Amino acid sequence: MLRITFDEAIRRAIEKNPTVQAAAAGILRAEGLLRQARAATRLQVFGNITTTTLNTGVDFQGTTVTPRNSLAATLTADMPIVAAAAWARRAQAEDARNVAEFAVADTRRQVALAAADAYLTILAARRVVEANARARDTAKAHFDLATELEQRGAGSRLNALRAQQQFSTDEALVETARLALYGAQEALGVLIAADEPADASDEPAFDLPADAPSSQTASLTSFRSDLKLFAAEQLAAERIVRDSSKDWWPSIDALFQPSSTYPSPFFLPGNSWRFLLQANVPVFDSGQRASSKIQRQAALEQTRSLFAGATMQATSQVRAAREAVSSGERVLASARGAAGQARDVVDITNIAFRAGAATNIEVIDAERSARDAETAVAVAEDTLRRARLELLTALGRFP
């Protein structure tokens, strides 16, 4: 089984996960649209060749006026001089590419969070396995003692059966916990694009950097990829609305058209050229441009609402994560104290049982309490790790 550190798992998830690779294709598509928009504002050159065959030619006094077969070749060079709408679409395409880049960054963040979640699940599941294994070993020792006492005539069959029942229960819990651990390892392997399960090999620190921002909106927008994405979408929508007026601007194109005809026409030169300035002025469109502006305004209002909601949620996440970290530290300290006390109770109860001062039921109850206390420590450690991860994520410092 592949063993991997936390940092390496996050790096591999970001680089090799198919979801990130699929999102990166969006940047390539946006780049293609940007080049297409730029091409519409630059020189265009295209040629045209036409062959004509008439049912009969036209002759006049032995001279061919209109030949039956003729070939005409024309080359057209078109250069936009005034193209406000096309220029606007070019700028909008650049905004779309920026949005695509921010979308990929946010996808990387989401994949990294999924990998971190799987990694932390492995650590927590391993602690549960260890706690259940210790409880099973303790129950096994108690079962062996109860069996020995029964064989010597100093114990009862009932005590031995109770101890055996507790041992069987703990052994089943160990198998269940091991299966949950293996499922988390498989999930991590999928996230890092490994064709095998992956196991966690270290404990992530999740230390808060010294330059971590506060919960202020401006600071969060500078670090969080999701807020950057929403802000970029809002800026792109604002540009589209501002550019709506350019749909009414006239457009002017300069065209240069050299042409050649063979055989040469009787009344025209065989080779010629012409230069044109062609203007297109929108006059009346039955409300088409006005309806487009309304739709663009609606899209802008939607992006503004999404950005405002995401910003409000981000500040709330920071406050909640800070409180969760403080609470998790207190809970973990209490859980560790309770687990230590429960282990002492097990030791004392076993000694008392050997001396005949405690019953078999008291030993079993002490073992169950110790197992539950160890499980509570594993849960508290996992909760604290996740709270620290959520705080880093809320501040935009993970990954």
Image: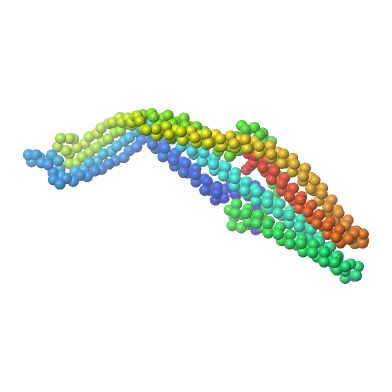
Quadrant housing the C terminus: top right
Q: Position of residue 230 (x, y in %)?
A: 55, 37
Picture residue at 21% right of the left edge, 43% below the top:
71
Residue 209 in sight: no
Give the total number of marks visible in the rendering: 0
Picture residue at 25% right of the left edge, 32% below the top:
274
Residue 155 is left or right of residue 392, and the answer is right
> Does residue 392 lie above or below 200 as drawn?
above
> Does residue 257 lie above or below 368 as drawn?
above
For this orientation, the residue located farthest to the left is 61
Picture residue at 20% right of the left edge, 40% below the top:
261
Q: Quadrant of residue 61?
A: top left
Picture residue at 15% right of the left edge, 35% below the top:
267
Q: Position of residue 66 (x, y in %)?
A: 14, 41
Rendered image coloring scheme: rainbow
Residue 345 is left or right of residue 179, and the answer is right
Residue 301 is left or right of residue 154, and the answer is left
Quadrant housing the N terminus: bottom right
> Does residue 398 lie above or below 4 as drawn?
above
Q: Position of residue 299 (x, y in %)?
A: 50, 36
User: Which is nearer the eye, 131 or 74?
Assistant: 131
Q: Quadrant of residue 205?
A: top right
Q: Position of residue 96 (x, y in %)?
A: 48, 38
Residue 6 in sight: yes
For this orientation, the residue located farthest to the front is 286
User: Which is nearer the eye, 327 or 287?
Assistant: 287
